[in-house]
Image: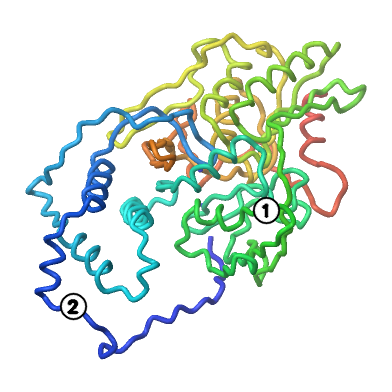
Amino acid sequence: MRQTSKEVGYCYKACQTFSNLAFPSSDVINLMVMRLTKARIFVFSVILILVSFGGGYVAGISGFIANSKNFPKVIISREVPPEKELDFSLFWRVWDTLQASYLDKSKIIESEMVYGAIKGMVAAVGDPYTVFLTPTENKVSEEDLQGNFDGVGIQIGFKGTRLAVIAPLPDSPAERAGVKPGDLILGIKDEKKDIELATTGMSLPQAVQIIRGAKGTKVTLTLFREGLSEPSVVDLIRDTIDVPSVTLEFVGESEKVAHIKVLKFGAETKQEWSTKVKEILRQPNLTGLVVDLRNNPGGYLQAAIDLASEFLPVGSTAVMEEKSNGQRTELKTESQGLLLNKKVVVLVNGGSASASEILAGALRDLKGYKVVGETSFGKGTVQEPLTLDNGSGLHITIGKWLTPKGTWINEKGIEPDIKLEDKDDTAEDEQLLEAIRLLSS
């Protein structure tokens, strides 16, 4: 799952005098360090397992995900290599000092401290798409791909290091309020949850959890849009979001053009797509198809390859994955498509991300289909989602993906062959009309 902006002015009070700080004596600290509790052993084991983690199958997050459910098999070493010079005694010193000295003992929740330690370790790599998720956050992430939840209906990601809207979902509170792809999210406020935060340094799961909420409740977003001088404040009332993967309508003169819109690449996308393709094949005198990937934030990798298979011969390279050592793996189509000889135009915009960019890139590189619209989002990294036994998860960047011709679109996006804006001040869909014109000419 990419500009400068003004920032919400949140000030954090961080000034204290040293006279107000109190530390336990060295004897007390040494005594605390010697205590090896069951909780300590558990934390130590979890951290070393995560440090030792490696390998796995291609997948992704927020637009590029596979159905991985377990950690790959790894060799776990509990010994710290001497050349690393890692000192875990500092970790335990802080742990024990908090246990012994923190004022409000009710706030010392060992399970939350474990999660916090792991989150900090994962965040230290500096990649906003590599994250540790608590069981609650992991459940929210899985709900996104199911397409049924309570919220405001926006898919979010990052523009560079800034939290941003990838796309609002159709007929959602966000779309009705005028939220657009590419809007930077500078602040989030929820009075009922007693939350008002700037998003600087906020992880994707944190943002999703704050924005998500019960139907009928309000969340306020401070947004900045490129080209405007000031941020805007938008109040959104949460609603139940139920979004299908695929929609179909017949448009143009005598309705001879199939307009098939893919809204996300979820677990159910292949079945919904197959149903729509059968309808298309029953349509007599079809002129061609418009594959509409606008405002599609992505989803499962395999779903994108399945859809590419509909237009490409068996064994075609739909996408390439490149690992850190430069090794490339070609991911190929595996089934015979039903739309191999159809005329096709692809639509994209700034809300087309990751798996939708993969499909658009494959169809243009291998079939020469025209791409119409606006430059896509530009998410070219590959993530693998791993589920732990307790329901928590780890999403980790394992590589980057490239189009069949070897193009890496990260933070650049796919440039359309025909660049055309869909204007807000008109009732017409200029991009769709251009696609119909190309198919009919």
Q: Residues within 10 Å of mark 1 (few under 14, many from 20)?
A: some
Q: Position of residue 258 (x, y in %)?
A: 79, 23
Determine contact: label 1, label 2, CB under 8 Å: no
Residue 181 to residue 262: above or below? below
Q: Residue at (82%, 35%) from the top-left corner?
A: 433
Relative to 91, is 234 on the left or the right?
Answer: right
Q: Which mark is residue 24?
A: 2
| Residue sitting at x 28%, y 28% | 73
Q: Helix, strand or loop at disc 2?
A: loop
Judging by the rendered image, the residue that carries numbered circle 1 is: 214
Q: Is residue 436 shown left or right of residue 63?
A: right
Seen at 80% across and 41% down, the residue is: 430
Label 1 residue SS: loop
Callout 1 amino acid: Ala
* Residue 123 visible to an observer of this rendering: no
**Colour approach in the figure:** rainbow
Q: In the image, what residue occupies the spot 16% across and 65% down?
A: 32
For this rendering, which residue is in front, 364 or 121? 121
Hey, what amino acid is under mark 2?
Pro
